[in-house]
Image (cartoon, grey):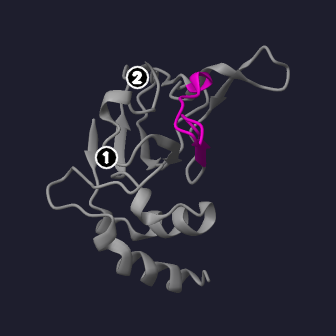
Amino acid sequence: TSWFCRFEDVPLLLAKANHILNIPLEAMEEPQVVRYQKGQEFSWHYDEVPASQLGNGGQRLATLLVYLNDLADEDCGGGTAFRDLFLADKKTPLVMQPKQGSALLFFPAFRDGSPDDRTLHRSEVMTCDSEKWIVQMWVHRDAYQAVLPAGNSNVAARSKMEDMINRLGYE
């Protein structure tokens, strides 16, 4: 289950993404909150935009996933797994386990817009009664116009984001 967020409703996420990662507000796609329950998963996929759909913002250059909760135990599944990215031993696939407040940043395409096929990933099946909550946001190469929900605007959220930046003491 997922819900698209109005930019103006998530100024803390926007402020941190903008400040810590230097992500320009104009390039941010609608943040999306996702809930996974027991038995749910998201199968193998890429985050890049198909070439035929690059008209709005160009290619997705970055994916930001923020984990909003811990799982009941480590055997619950629910990790974000990469098929073609490995740990230092070059044998063990990279899997990010959900931990509240942690974030995963990866790059589904290179700066020139060509896809990075190594970023094929999935959300592993949830095997316990716990829920997994994340917020995800994609960053485009160029300015992106929000599509959902109707009337949503990244640029219109600028003042709320800047107010949050000031409240956090970012300069």
99, 140: nearer the viewer: 140
Q: Which residue is mark 1?
A: 56
> Label 1 amino acid?
Asn
Q: Which residue is mark 2?
A: 41
**Which image quarter is the C terminus in?**
bottom right
In the orientation shown, which residue stands out farthest toward the right? Answer: 89
In front: label 1 or label 2:
1
Q: In the figure, is residue 114 to the left or right of 147? A: right
Residue 36, given in percent of the width and then of the height, sits at 37, 32
Q: Secondary structure at mark 1?
A: loop
- Categorize mark 2 by other alpha carbons within 10 Å: few (<14), some (14-19), many (20+): some
Q: In the figure, is residue 70 to the left or right of 87? A: left
Residue 57 lies in the magenta-colored region: no
Residue 108 lies in the magenta-colored region: yes
Q: Which residues are magenta?
A: 103-119
Residue 123 in the image: above or below residue 72:
above
> Label 2 amino acid?
Glu
Residue 28 in the image: above or below residue 162:
above
Q: Earlier in the sequence, mark 1 or mark 2?
A: 2
Structural distance between the alpha carbons of marks 1 and 2: 28 Å
Q: Secondary structure at mark 2?
A: loop
Residue 113 in the image: above or below residue 121:
below
In the orientation shown, which residue stands out farthest toward the top? Answer: 91
User: In the figure, residue 170 lies in which quadrant?
Assistant: bottom right
Image point (81%, 18%), residue name: 90
Residue 43, given in percent of the width and then of the height, sits at 42, 18
**Which image quarter is the N terminus in?**
top left
Image point (39%, 33%), residue name: 49
Residue 142, given in percent of the width and then of the height, sits at 43, 53
